[in-house]
Amino acid sequence: MDTPAPAPAARIAGELTDYIRHLGALSPGEDAPPPEADLFDSGYLDSLSTVTLTAHIQATYGVAIGDQDLFDPALTTIAGLAGLIAARAEPHATRA
């Protein structure tokens, strides 16, 4: 029996976590932040890494994160970002 593909938001959350690790916000072997952890308060993102992450989101998923989005408390978490991307992305960009 085939294993079902993760839901788009869950898959995107995993990809975002990997990208945050790539940015150097996580040391090798360090546990990823929980999906609901505030990435700013926890020290995983700062202003520079946020610019880099938003550029990555636009390039990868075709989703622009506007200035107004950056002030939405729901978007300070991996789960919140993944949900926004899944809702706004073109269908082909969220498929496995």
Image (cartoon, rainbow, N blue to C red):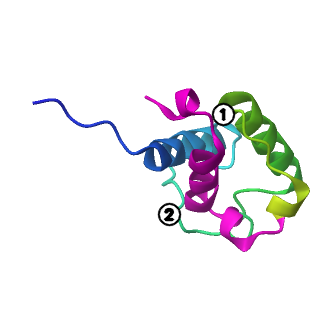
Q: Is residue 47 above or below residue 52?
A: below
Whole-angstrom CA distance, mark 2 to mark 1, is 22 Å
Q: Which mark is residue 6?
A: none
At 80% from the left edge and 60% from the top edge, which residue is drawn?
Answer: 69
The quadrant of the rendering that contains the C terminus is top left
At 81% from the left edge and 37% from the top edge, which residue is drawn?
Answer: 55
Secondary structure predominantly adopted by residues drawn in magenta: helix
In the structure shown, which secondary structural element does the residue marked by tag 2 occupy? loop
Residue 4 occupies which quadrant of the picture?
top left
At 44% from the left edge and 49% from the top edge, which residue is drawn?
Answer: 10
Q: Is residue 83 magenta?
A: yes
In the structure shown, which secondary structural element does the residue marked by tag 1 occupy? helix
Q: Please give the residue where the numbered disc 1 appears in the rendered image.
A: 61
* Label 2 with label 1: CB-CB less than 8 Å: no
Rate crowding at label 1 as few (under 14), some (14 to 19) or many (20 or more) other CA atoms within 10 Å.
some
- Amino acid type of disc 2? Pro
Q: Which stretch did the figure color magenta?
A: 71-96
At 68% from the left edge and 49% from the top edge, which residue is drawn?
Answer: 25
- Amino acid type of disc 1? Tyr
Q: Is residue 29 visible?
A: no
Q: Is residue 80 above or below residue 53?
A: below
Rate crowding at label 2 as few (under 14), some (14 to 19) or many (20 or more) other CA atoms within 10 Å.
few
- Provide residue 14's location: percent of width, then percent of height: 49, 44
Q: Please give the residue where the numbered disc 2 appears in the rendered image.
A: 34
